[in-house]
Amino acid sequence: MNSPPEFNLTPELDAEIRRAAELLCEARHCVGLTGAGLSVESGIPPFRGKGGLWTKHGEPPLDGYQRFLRDPAGEWRKRLAPTESWAIALHETLGSAKPNAGHRAFAELERRSLLASLITQNVDDLHGQAGSHQLLEIHGNFRRLRCLECVTRFDPKDIAVDPENLPPHCPECGGVVKGDTVQFGEPIPRDVLECCQETVARADCMLVAGTSATVFPAAEFPIDVLRRGGCVIEVNPEPSELTPLATLSLPGPGGALLERLLHHSAAIAGEVAS
C-alpha cells in the first residue's frame, strides 16, 4: 500500500473541515459519492495519466460489452485465462489492495447515521471491505458476477463455471452471466441506477471524495443536489470541475481529511448531546 501523502493541516483548513462537519450533522439525508482518487492511497493508481494502469498497460477495448454479447464464451475464456496486459495488471492490482483511512471513514459515517448511502464509481470492493453496507456500486464490483437478464449478483464460488460449457448461466432465471464490472459500451445496471437516482433525489447534502466529476451519470448527482438547494462538500487533492460549484471544497488527501471530518462530527455530536 502507498504511504499516506504528507498533509499540512492549517488552522484555516481545519475551520473549513469543521464547517463541513456541521453541514453533515445538519443534513437530513446525506449521500456519499466516491471515485478512483480515494483508492490511490490503497495502492491503486488512476487509470489514465502519468503512472496510470491504462497508460502503462493499454486500455480495455471501447466495445468490450459488444464483444461480450457477440461471443460470451470467448470472452469468458479470456476472463479465466487473461492474456491482455491491462487485464492482468488490473486483476493483480485490485486483488492486493486493502481499504485505507478514507474507506474506513465513510463506513464510520454510515455507522454514526451521518451518511444515508454511498455511491461509488470504483469496482475495487474496498468500501465493502471497510464496512459500508448502504453501498451502491454504480460500475459494479470486480469480485462478483451478474446475470444480464435478472441482474442478480453472485459470489463466483456460487456459480458453476465449466470451461467446456461457457458461458455460465444464472441459476435464478437461466440468463447469461458475466463479470459484474461495467464494461465500455455497457449500460449501468438498471437496479443500481434506480437506487442511485432515488437516494440522490432525497439528498440535501452530498460528500464527494476522489472523483474528477466528469464521468456520467455520476457527475450529474452533485449538480442535482445543488440545483435543489442542497450542499455539496468536495474532498480532493486537486481542483476538479466540481470545485468552483461546491459549497465547500477541502483540498488534500482523502484519508486524512475524512478522518478529521469524523473527529469534528463526533465533537459536534457531543456538544449537541450536552
Image (spheres, helix red, strand yellow):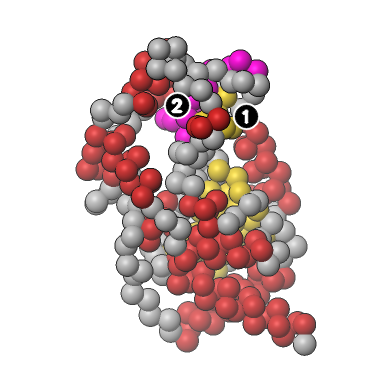
Q: Tell me which segment is drawn in magenta.
A: 173-188
Please identify the quarter of the rendering in which residue 158 is found: top right
Q: Nearer the viewer, residue 16 or 246?
A: 16
Q: Is residue 219 above or below residue 140?
A: below
Task: Determine the residue positioned at 59% across, 55% down.
Answer: 132
Compared with 21, 67 (above or below) is above
Q: Which residue is mark 2?
A: 185
- In the rendering, at what x and y percent does residue 263 appear? 57, 78
- Mark 1 vs mark 2: which is more N-terminal? 1
Instruction: Please name the amino acid that badge 2 sits on.
Output: Gly
- Please state if 45 lies on the left or on the right of 150 as rendered: left
Q: CA distance from mark 1 to mark 2?
A: 20 Å
Of residues 132 and 248, the one nearer the viewer is 132
State whether residue 221 appears in this view: no
The residue positioned 44% from the left and 62% from the top of the image is 100
Q: Taking 110 as reference, is 16 above or below it?
A: below
Where residue 4 sits: x, y (%)? 36, 69
Residue 202 image point, x, y percent: 73, 51
Q: Amino acid at mark 1?
A: Thr
**72 in relation to 126, above or below:** above
Residue that badge 1 annotates: 152
